[in-house]
Image: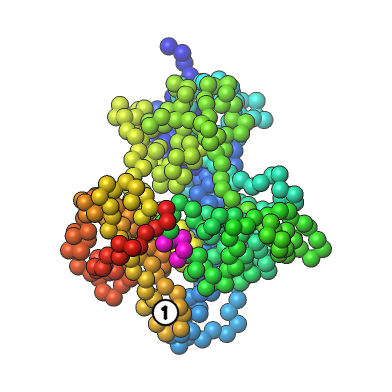
Amino acid sequence: MTQYDYDLFVIGAGSGGVRAARLTALGGKRVAIAEEFRVGGTCVIRGCVPKKFMVMASEVSHALEIAEGYGWSFDNAKFDWPTFLEAKDVEIARLSGIYAANLGKAGVDLVHGRAVLKDAHTVEIVGKDQTITAEKILIATGGRPWKPESLPGVEHAITSEEAFHLPELPKRILIAGGGYIAVEFAGIFAGLGVETTLIYRGPNILRGFDDDVRAHLAGEIEKRGIKVILGCQHKSIEKTETGLVNHLENGHAIETDVVMFATGRVPHVKDLGLETAGVELNDAGAIKVDDLSRTTAENIWAIGDVTDRMNLTPVAIREAVAFHETVYRENPQAFDYEAVATAVFSQPPVGVVGLTEAEARHSCAKGVDVYVTRFRPMKYAFTGSDERVLMKLVVDADSQRVVGVHIVGPESPEMIQLAAIAVKAGLTKAQWDATCAVHPTMAEELVTLKEKQSPAHMTAG
């Protein structure tokens, strides 16, 4: 039997890679993990966690407006960007350190450097004259932001990764994109007092979400002062003495201090040496895997965003657990991607789980029942705000199972986590209705919705 340096070598120390490495090492296997940047990956270092800190910082301005309606007054309230950046960076460093320490406690060897496949069992650590062999290899390198490199002047633009480290807060920003990253950062910068424009080539933001959610959120973020331009994209970016001029395809030009592209992410597969190990990509440029996360190379697996299946941190972690159970515990598991809840930390935020109305109409043989409510949150009673919450239940007309829940409004990410349990369990509308409400809360609307949308109401798909 060939003797390898390790039983498992993991490339990428993000949430998925770290979980797989720790579980396998705790099971008694020899494990190493390589990371070219910092332990923690996209989520901890340049994604979910620092972004959520930015969201919370930016929400304070709105909270102050609400507080004034309740009789509070604030003199000379101001935000200091450098102070926030320092606090954010200290916390991110602490979290990264915890991840690294947990790897060590589990017995995982941490290799600092970029690992490249030399063959199906061998990796080279670039620039360190180090070659390592492993019986099995797991690729968990995640994704990276994409921007249109052929666009004239695109070199003057940033992505979400640079947005976390801007040396100073701009006075004006234009964000290109309509997905969750774009709308989240639009809310962040607008909340911090930046004149914010969001431009998207599609007919509405958040493609893939329920159409009622998309329309509702587009209207609500405009109430927060964000200028939304739809059906349009860049023609070029011109750097001038006073800023960056965004020349748009509609003939207009907008000058800003910063241009940020949030136009999607792509699997991080460049220069990994995949072809030398027999690892193939699919048509979308992601690593091709089967239901058990095995690649086209028999001893190599891949999980997380690099496979472009469902690009969410908790999903990558669950894929890691399934990999460990399959490979090292003789318990083959394929992660179930049905009814996975997700949140958009826009302002107001979005929480969804299950099918959109359009998806349900295609998959439910006997149609769907739709329940929708829009109302002003109690919190805004004294402020004069016309902001509204949207709540929507999509129900299979035949089985009466609740197959989709969609919420736009304060605390919707918290609510959707618990709603997801009910959707995943297959509970019926009658069971939701039988649950006693907690009053006064926004969430009580989820169990008190009685009136179906009229048959004439149809989502445009």
Q: Seen in the image, is 153 located left or right of residue 299? A: right
* Residue found at the very far bottom of the displayed protein: 71
The image quadrant of residue 188 is bottom right
What's the image's color scheme? rainbow
Q: Seen in the image, is 81 located left or right of residue 337? A: right
Q: Quadrant of the N terminus?
A: top left
> Could you say whether the residue bearing mark 1 is in a helix, strand or loop?
helix
Counting from the top left corner in percent of width and height, residue 70 is at 43, 85
Q: Residue at 33% x, 58% y: name it.
A: 405
| Amino acid at circle 1 | Tyr
- In this view, the residue in front, 5 or 8, is 8
- Res 422 visible: no
Measured along the vertical axis of the image, is residue 304 above or below residue 411?
A: above
- Res 332 visible: yes
- In this view, the residue in front, 7 or 196, is 196
* Residue found at the very far front of the displayed protein: 456
Give the residues drawn in magenta, as a range: 212-216
Q: Main secondary structure of the magenta part?
A: helix
Q: Residue at 59% x, 30% y: name it.
A: 272
Tell me the residue that label 1 is attached to: 380
Counting from the top left corner in percent of width and height, residue 360 is at 33, 51
**Classed neighbour count for the residue bearing mark 1: other residues with Cα under 10 Å, few (<14), some (14–19), many (≥20):** some
- Asked whether residue 52 is drawn in magenta, I would say no
Q: Seen in the image, is 368 located left or right of residue 303? A: left
